Image (cartoon, rainbow, N blue to C red):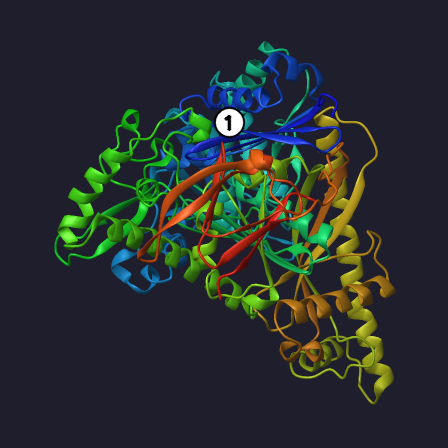
Amino acid sequence: MSRPVPMVLGIDTGGTMSDTVLVSEDGRFVIGKAQTTPENEAIGILNSLRDAAKKWNMTVDEVAKSIRTIIYSGTIMLNRVLTREGLQPLGIITTAGFEDTLRMGRARQSWNTLSYAERLHAISHFHPEPLVPRNMIMGVRERILVTGVEMIPLYESEVEEAAKKLIERGAKAIIIMFLNSWANPSHEIKAAEIVEKVAKEKGVSVPIFMSHRIAPVLGELRRLNAVVLQVYAAEPSREQFRKMEEAFRARGFKAPLYIFTNYGTVVPPTFERLIHTVTSGPSAGNVAVQYLANLYGLDYMVGTDVGGTSFDVTTVVARRPIMNPFTIVERYEAAVPSIATESIGAGTGSYIRVDPVTKSLRVGPDSAGYRIGVSWRDGGVETVTINDAMVILGYLNPNYFLGGEIKLDKDRALKEFERQVAQPLGIDVYEAAWGSYMMVADHMRLHLEGIVRGLGFSPENFYLVSYGGGGPSFVAAYTAGMRFAGVMVPEVAPAFSAWGTTLADIGIRAEKSLEAYVPPLPGVKPLGMAEMIMKGVAEMLKIKITGAAEMEGIRGLLSGQAINALNSAWKELRGYIEEEFKRAGLAGEITWRPAVRMLYAGMLDDIEVDAPAIEVDEGLLQKLCESFDNLFEKVYASAARSREFGYVVTRAILTGYMALRKPTLLEEKEETERIPENAFKGEREMYWNGKWYRASLYEMGLLRTGNRVKGPAIIEAPAATYVIPPGFSTRLDRRRIFWLEGGG
């Protein structure tokens, strides 16, 4: 084949590894891995890129000449929150009476990141410490109603006094968040003018952030959290992204850098709402799962990402991700849209301990991260990990970890596992390692099954995609007995999320809260709440209902109000998105994708539904309601539909896209099941369920499409190890996706 021409560089930095994927014009790709360097992520990224480039016999400088797009996803912002090293001190000016919003928080913020078992125990619940101390939060009198009508004017003198105190106390930025500014931002705009005037008089420059610019949605806590996180964690990241760009420029790269968002698009580092990129890594994995769903024509898929520190699960229903209207950032719930991802602290680097009192085994949730385990002496780890267990069990090749870049010491792993785990439990060291491996696999399986069944489905409805550096090592164990429709392990699994970043377009998403009631569709008799609302409107308008004609008139009136509200909201959001594209210097055709969040009147949880067009009329509104009915039936069940109650549109959503050139998955001609001789690497002892087996070893990259490998076997790649237990087999299809089969 001709020499590849790298086109896109995808990046995913995690707590353990920095993954890169280089994709060529014809769809070929290579994966790079290197240990994450938290103190300067650019170092780890360039090390990873160097690892990828050498697989095409290229240098980083040679790659730089042809790359057209660089896309980053990672943990810069999240790490800043976790380590409490963000911009501070910050000042907040808010509606009088709401100064303690951050301290009061919300009950679920005390348990929203805990496992299901831990959520049951109040002793495990604790609220996160607010990022802004109470003495830096000032209240001023004002009140806008949810309708947008001013009830109490802004007390401008109180704003002036608050600004003086916050500046005197050293505020490096001031946030303005009034109760219903999402409905009418006039008070926030005026307050910002006053703060700017005070700062000028004092001879200081203080950035001002208004909540309606960052998150114009209902709900003061999540909105305030979004703005605080934006200023505390996202704004300082702009400087890091600048340094990252400089590091690339120094190596000859001319391609622009984009940041992956929580909802599956990319944005320039200048994007105002940079907080929309805080959980980009898991979202990139979901985009790649969606790509496979469309490629294979599958409606229901679940993606499972096994990393060094966590096990992340994301789902695709009706070939669309499940979108959350908020994002959890270290227990803070922020009004930032994101693809739904459920995570637990279970990964290949999870620590293994024996409880000194109960003499029971405990795995995680803390992790050695990039330091791997005691088997890597240079990591300085003293507590054994799951990686150590897999070395002992024969799954990992001590001389081929990261392609041999890191050498692992099996003897040290055995000695420490014997001392720390096997002896305290009074069992054989290999049984101790197996028990540890299966315990974390059981945690993964229970978490996975809980999510799938919590959606109202059985595993048989879903195809599963396993990825992440540890996914192929665990997939047979954590899917055992669940009978998924199919289990897929992509060859690109070790850098699946990085690959997912390369599949996205530039896309800026904006949202605005609404409360627009839509009565039942024609032909559906209004019942319950719908009947009450329609009769209430009739009384307010002094219309006497004598038959169907009057009810139809009221239905038309309510529908018209909903149409006007939606059109107005989408017009406002379109203006904001166009402004952001212009600010970033991006010119070109914008493709619009409107959507709404809806629910049946009286329900608590809404669902995101795509709209067929951006201009709303009676016909389009009806199609929107019908689409909601169909999606609701797929997400829940037809018996749960409540069309007779009518609908409520809770949020208008608009995303503007500019297309990026994207790679396609290379398809090869399927060959016979016969495995090439050069792919066979020999045999190794492998422990599985109490027995030792002679496992055949294969090099993943040398297997050909159509090959079938029967267990016990281990398929090795520089960045991943695929474990095929006894009773299992795997087949490589023409798109270089492995399908795991068997296991009873």
The amino acid type, in three-letter code, at marker 1 is Ser
Q: In the rendered image, which quarter contains the N terminus?
A: top right
Residue drawn at x 40%, y 29% is 88
Identify the residue at image location x=44%, y=42%: 307
Q: Is residue 423 left or right of residue 443?
A: left
x and y percent of residue 394 in the render? 36, 43
The answer, for residue 272, to whether it is visible in the render is: no
Q: Which residue occupies the foreground of this view, 414 or 606?
A: 414
Q: Which residue is mark 1?
A: 237
Residue 727 placement (x, y as % from top left): 47, 59
Give the image quarter of residue 53: top right
Is 7 positioned to the left or the right of 97 in the image? right
What residue do we see at 29% from left, 24% from top?
Answer: 378
Q: Is residue 689 above or below residue 575?
A: below
Rendered location of residue 152, percent (x, y): 56, 51
Badge 1 density bin: few <14, some 14–19, many ≥20, Cα 10 Å: many
Q: Above or below — where is 515 with respect to 164?
A: below
State the image quarter where residue 211 is shown.
top right
Number of marks: 1
Q: Is residue 183 visible?
A: yes
Report the front residue among 219 and 292: 292
Kind of element beneath mark 1 = helix
Q: Nearer the viewer, residue 666 or 199?
A: 666
- Up the image or down, 472 lies above or below 457; here it is above
Q: Percent position (x, y) of residue 655? A: 72, 44
